[in-house]
Image: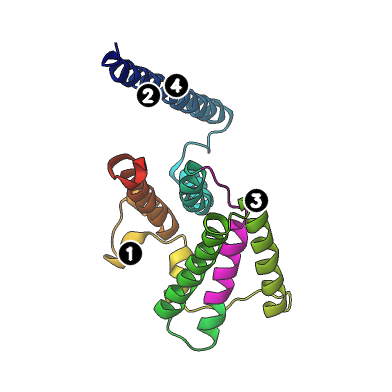
């Protein structure tokens, strides 16, 4: 009788896993169905909706949110939450721009900005994981601190006038212009740097979550 208990437990776990997978598939199909319905309705409502120009505009506007949501997905998968992503985005952008105005090379300013964002994330993670402070409180405080630092550092003024080597990565120009200035393929020309970066990161995170041990941890 005791020998059958592990087998029964294993079967129960397998059934629960199958139910969870089935539920996830249904949810995914529902979201895809809603998205397709929205596309059909909007296409019927406006002749300009399903055009390459508008598709590029939509992808460009959502690329930043897509990149932020990838990191947030990992946090939520662990049962956490992070309210500081917007403030960190703004803070690292201000830091990069300020460093460029101080004369640092663009590549170095970008690297230091990314390192600063990583440091903020590491501090948040340490406070939550090691000191057991509630993630909601930690990231809310981080948001307030970063916003305060930004206001003081910039004197409430915007930071602008950057070299083209920096602004290119947020520009509407095709990413393929880096390799060829004579490329004339409309479908490829809609892929500007923000869209390309967001798609590349989506692919990497998809592989990480579905094919790597860390994603199943």
Indicate the quadrant containing the N terminus: top left, top right, bottom left or bottom right. top left
- Between tags 1 and 4, which lies in front? 4
Whether residue 6 is situated above or below residue 77 in the rendered picture: above
Q: Name the residue nearer the viewer: 164 or 94.
A: 94
In the image, taking residue 45 as reference, residue 9 lies left or right, namely left
Residue to which mark 3 is pinned: 136
Contact, mark 2 vs mark 3 (Cβ under 8 Å): no
Q: Earlier in the sequence, mark 1 or mark 4?
A: 4
Measured in 3D between alpha carbons, the distance from the residue under mark 2 to the one under mark 3, in whole angstroms, is 30 Å
Main secondary structure of the magenta stretch: helix
Marks 1/2 in contact by CB < 8 Å: the verdict is: no
Residue 94 percent location from the top left of the image: 59, 73
Q: CA distance from mark 3 to mark 1?
A: 42 Å
Q: Which residue is mark 4?
A: 23
Q: For mark 1, what is the residue?
A: 177
Q: Give me the C-alpha separation between circle 3 and circle 4.
A: 28 Å
Q: Given this view, does label 1 or label 2 mark the residue nearer the observer?
A: 2
* Label 1 or label 2, whichever comes before in sequence order: 2
| Mark 2 vs 3, N-terminal side | 2
Q: Residue 158: where, in percent of width, then height?
A: 66, 73
Residue at x 35%, y 40% (from the top left corner): 216
The range drawn in magenta is 79-96
Q: Give coordinates of residue 66: x percent, y percent.
A: 48, 48
Residue 12, how many percent across, how many down? 37, 17
Closer to the eye: label 3 or 4 = 3
Does the magenta portion include 86? yes
Query: Which residue is at the front of the view, 89 or 143?
Result: 143
Q: Which mark is residue 17?
A: 2
Within 10 Å of disc 3 (Cα), the crowding (few <14, some 14-19, many 20+) is: some
Q: Return the residue found at the far top.
A: 1
């Amino acid at each position: 009788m005791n020998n059958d208990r592990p087998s029964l437990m294993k079967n129960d776990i397998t059934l629960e896993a199958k139910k969870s997978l089935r539920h996830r598939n249904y949810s995914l199909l529902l979201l895809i169905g809603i998205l397709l319905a929205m596309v059909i309705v909007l296409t019927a409502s406006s002749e300009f909706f399903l055009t390459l120009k508008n598709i590029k505009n939509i992808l460009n506007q959502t690329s930043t949110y897509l990149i932020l949501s990838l990191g947030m997905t990992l946090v939520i998968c662990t049962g956490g939450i992070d309210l500081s992503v917007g403030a960190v985005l703004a803070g690292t952008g201000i830091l990069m721009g300020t460093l460029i105005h101080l004369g640092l090379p663009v590549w170095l300013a970008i690297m230091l900005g990314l390192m600063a964002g990583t440091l903020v994330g590491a501090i948040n993670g340490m406070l939550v994981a090691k000191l057991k402070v509630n993630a909601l409180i930690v990231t809310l405080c981080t948001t307030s601190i970063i916003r305060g630092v930004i206001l003081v550092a910039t004197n409430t003024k915007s930071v602008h006038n950057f070299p083209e080597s920096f602004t290119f990565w947020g520009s509407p120009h095709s990413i393929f212009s880096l390799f060829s200035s004579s490329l004339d393929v409309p479908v490829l020309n809609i892929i500007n740097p923000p869209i390309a970066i967001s798609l590349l990161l989506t692919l990497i995170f998809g592989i990480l979550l579905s094919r790597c041990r860390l994603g199943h941890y």
